[in-house]
C-alpha cells in the first residue's frame, strides 16, 4: 500500500460524471494506492500512521503534532497509478496494482478506520472515477508512505 500525503489548508475533489463533490479545510489530502498482496493488516497500519503522523506545527514551530492533535480533516482519494512501474519503456505498467474489487475494499476499509477508529472527519473521492482534485499545500509538506505485505 502506498500513499502520497500532503498537509493542506484546504482540499477538494469533484467528479463531473456524477456531480459528486467533497472538501475539507485544514488537514491531510491523501492519495492512496492499493497494491497486489495488500491486506487489512497494511490498511490498519496505513490508517494508524496517517492519524498519528506528526507533520503539523507545535507552539515552537516544529512539526510535532498530528492531524488528530490539531483536530484536522482528511480527504482520501483512491489512486491506482501510484502502483505504476516506470522502470522500462515510457508507458507505466500497472501490474502491481490490486484488482479493482480488492482495491476498493481496502480503500473503503482505510476510510472507515480513519473515521470510526481514529475519530478523524474523513471525506473521500469516488473509487474508480475520473476525478479533479484541488488543494492548497501547506508548507509545502508532502510525504510518501508505503507498507509492503509481510
Image (cartoon, helix red, strand yellow):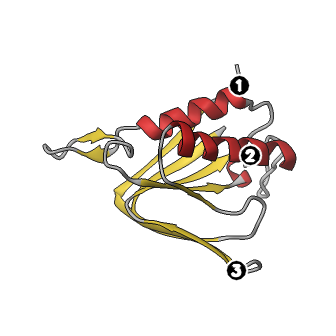
Residue at point 32%, 42% (across, down): 69
Mark closest to the chain's N terminus, 2 or 1: 2
Residue at mark 2 to residue at mark 3: CA–CA distance? 32 Å
Q: Looking at this rendering, what residue extends furthest in the top direction?
A: 150
Q: Could you tell me how far apart the alpha carbons at marks 1 and 3 are, in whole angstroms?
A: 36 Å
Q: For mark 3, what is the residue?
A: 19
Instruction: Give the crowd class for mark 1: few <14, some 14-19, many >=20 residues within 10 Å.
Output: few
Observer-side mark, 2 or 3, equals 3
Q: Which residue, given by chain and number where applicable, does mark 1 sit on?
A: 149
10 left or right of 86? left
Q: Specify the quadrant that holds the C terminus.
A: top right
Q: Secondary structure at mark 2?
A: loop
Quadrant containing the N terminus in the rendered view: top right
User: Which residue is at a point 47% across and 47% down the rendered structure image?
Assistant: 120
Residue 88: where, in percent of width, then height? 78, 47
Q: Label 2 vs label 1: CA separation? A: 18 Å
Residue on which the image places disc 2:
85
Residue at disc 3, secondary structure: loop
Across and down, in percent, residue 131 comes to 68, 70
Could you classify mark 3 by the number of other residues whose Cα lies within 10 Å: few (under 14), some (14-19), or many (20 or more)? few
Judge depth for marks 2 and 1 and give the one in front: 1
Marks 2/1 in contact by CB < 8 Å: the verdict is no
Residue 77 x, y percent position in the rendering: 62, 57
- Numbered circles on residues, count: 3
Is 7 left or right of 128, judged from the image as shown? left
Q: Are marks 2 and 3 in contact (CB under 8 Å)?
A: no
Crowdedness near tag 2: few (<14), some (14–19) or many (≥20) residues, C-alpha within 10 Å: some
Q: Secondary structure at mark 1?
A: loop
77 lies above or below 42: below
Q: Quadrant of residue 47?
A: top right
Q: For the point 76% across and 57% down, which residue is it?
A: 90
Amino acid at each position: 500500500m502506498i500513499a502520497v500525503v500532503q498537509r493542506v489548508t484546504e482540499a477538494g475533489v469533484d467528479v463531473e460524471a456524477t456531480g459528486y463533490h467533497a472538501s475539507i479545510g485544514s488537514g491531510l489530502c491523501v492519495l492512496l494506492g492499493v497494491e497486489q498482496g495488500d491486506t487489512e493488516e497494511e490498511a490498519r497500519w496505513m490508517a494508524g500512521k496517517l492519524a498519528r503522523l506528526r507533520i503539523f506545527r507545535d507552539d515552537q514551530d516544529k512539526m510535532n503534532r498530528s492531524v488528530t492533535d490539531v483536530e484536522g480533516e482528511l480527504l482520501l482519494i483512491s489512486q491506482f497509478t501510484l502502483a505504476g512501474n516506470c522502470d522500462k519503456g515510457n508507458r507505466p505498467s500497472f501490474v502491481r496494482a490490486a484488482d479493482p474489487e480488492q482495491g476498493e475494499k481496502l480503500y473503503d476499509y482505510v476510510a472507515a478506520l480513519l473515521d470510526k477508529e481514529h475519530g478523524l472527519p474523513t471525506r473521500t473521492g469516488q473509487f474508480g472515477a475520473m476525478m479533479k482534485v484541488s488543494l492548497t499545500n501547506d508548507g509545502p509538506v508532502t510525504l510518501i508512505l508505503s507498507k509492503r505485505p509481510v
